[in-house]
Image (cartoon, rainbow, N blue to C red):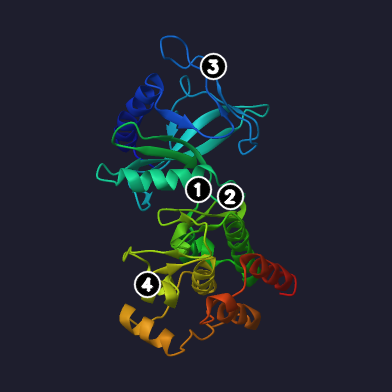
């Protein structure tokens, strides 16, 4: 919970930004939003989200803007900046309150890279992908508004007391949710390139959504060649590390590493190996052994994700089916 002083500081920064952006018409609301302005530039009607994510409620941005700050400065972050947890009032039949998260981006953020992420996010809608609601890019600092996942990153959650209480069936369910979101990405010819527990967010009822598309790309060819050397070493497929070659099948490799993180409650993959040793061992055929208490079927799925040839790795749709099938046998 943010202290009163912290809340005032954050509100003092964010409130003027949003008010100014509304007046200047610089907030872009994506599919499903209907925004109406008066002649003076003030918001005169409610902002209504039609897609059902907020239950058809009405969001009043002026009279109830930032009525409460539930997070704290720097509570979490992504590739582009710091995140702040903000609650908006949602006027609905049940008078519910819906939560959103505002990312106040670093002033030095690469505007071009940020725009790429926005273009990807605004066209992706799935129950297991984080939803983008609005973005302001007229001038620095830039910020985006997405849904709030109150339990934070999957990595932090698994390492915490609540996550450590989860049984094997709950961990498999989390894995299946991620596979479901990634299956949608695969169908949309999108590659994530940074799939890991740190980039999956957890909400109420342990709903999980893939997030942080800072390295994502929409591809027209079966694979994408990248010159970016800033890639997550222990999560990346050998073809990505050696040739900068990314595809949905390199995401599948990363998913196998994510499964290791999940079943070990946030364990570090390839323990005892540095980056150079990991690559060398992988090229020579080494694969991580089954962690303690890991179901046999889950380790077999991991190994299938770590096939040397990308075409030999399963699709995410198949991975989800395998996880769901074994869930009922636990």
Q: CA distance from mark 3 to mark 4?
A: 49 Å
Locate residue 176, reporting x and y percent: 63, 64
- N-term-proximal mark, 1 vs 4: 1
Depth check: give the residue in front, 306 or 157.
Answer: 306
Q: Is residue 257 visible?
A: yes
Kindly indicate the quadrant of the structure image that contains residue 237.
bottom left
At mark 2, the secondary structure is helix
Which badge, 3 or 4, is on the more N-terminal residue? 3
Pick whichever of labels 2 and 3 is earlier in the sequence: 3
Ranked by sequence position, the earlier of labels 2 and 1 is 1
Give the numbered dot on residue 150.
1
Q: Which is nearer the N-term, disc 2 or disc 4?
A: 2
Tell me if mark 1 has few (under 14), some (14-19) or many (20+) residues whose alpha carbon lies within 10 angstroms of its own: some
For residue 184, side relative to residue 309 (left or right): right
Q: Are marks 2 and 1 in contact (CB under 8 Å)?
A: yes
The residue where tag 2 is placed is 204
Q: Residue furthest top?
A: 39
Q: CA distance from mark 1 to mark 4?
A: 28 Å
Residue 75 vertical position relative to residue 191 in the rendered view, above or below: above
Instruction: Looking at this view, name the residue that lies furthest to the front.
Output: 221
Q: Which of marks 3 and 1 precedes in the sequence?
A: 3
Q: Quadrant of residue 24?
A: top left
Q: Is residue 155 visible?
A: no
Q: Residue at x 37, y 51 (%)?
A: 77
Q: Nearer the viewer, mark 2 or mark 4?
A: 4
Look at discs 1 and 3 and give the one toward the viewer.
3
Q: Depth check: give the residue in front, 235 or 93.
A: 235
Which residue lies under the disc numbered 3? Answer: 45
Q: Evaluate if marks 1 and 3 touch, with contact meaning CB atoms under 8 Å apart.
A: no
Which residue is rendered at x = 40% and y = 43% of the image? Answer: 71
* Disc assigned to residue 233: 4
């Amino acid at each position: 919970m943010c202290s009163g002083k912290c809340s005032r500081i954050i509100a003092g920064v964010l409130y003027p930004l949003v008010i100014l952006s509304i007046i200047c018409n610089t907030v872009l609301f994506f599919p499903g939003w209907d925004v109406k302005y008066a002649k003076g530039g003030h918001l005169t009607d409610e902002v209504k989200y039609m897609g059902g994510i907020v239950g058809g409620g009405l969001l009043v941005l002026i009279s109830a803007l930032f009525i409460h700050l539930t997070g704290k400065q720097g509570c979490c972050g992504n590739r582009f900046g710091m995140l702040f947890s903000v609650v908006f009032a949602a006027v609905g039949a049940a008078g519910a309150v819906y939560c959103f998260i505002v990312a106040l981006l670093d002033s030095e953020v690469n505007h071009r890279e940020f725009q790429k992420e926005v273009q990807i996010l605004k066209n992706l809608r799935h129950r297991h992908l984080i939803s983008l609601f609005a973005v302001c890019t007229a001038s620095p600092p830039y910020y985006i508004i997405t849904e709030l996942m109150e339990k934070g990153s999957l990595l932090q959650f698994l390492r915490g007391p609540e996550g450590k209480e989860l049984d094997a069936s709950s961990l498999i369910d989390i894995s299946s949710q991620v596979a479901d979101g990634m299956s949608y990405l695969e169908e949309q010819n999108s590659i994530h390139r940074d799939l890991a527990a740190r980039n999956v967010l957890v909400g109420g009822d342990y709903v999980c959504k893939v997030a942080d598309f800072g390295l994502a790309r929409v591809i027209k060819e079966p694979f994408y060649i990248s010159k970016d050397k800033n890639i997550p070493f222990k999560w990346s497929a050998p073809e990505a590390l050696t040739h900068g070659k990314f595809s949905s099948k390199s995401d599948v490799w990363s998913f196998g590493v994510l499964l290791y993180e999940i079943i070990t409650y946030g364990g570090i993959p390839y323990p005892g190996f540095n980056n150079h040793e990991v690559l060398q061992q992988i090229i020579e055929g080494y694969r991580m052994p089954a962690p303690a208490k890991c179901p046999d079927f889950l380790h077999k799925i991991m190994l299938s994700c770590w096939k040397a040839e990308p075409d030999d790795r399963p699709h995410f749709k198949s991975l989800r089916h395998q996880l769901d099938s074994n869930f009922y046998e636990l």
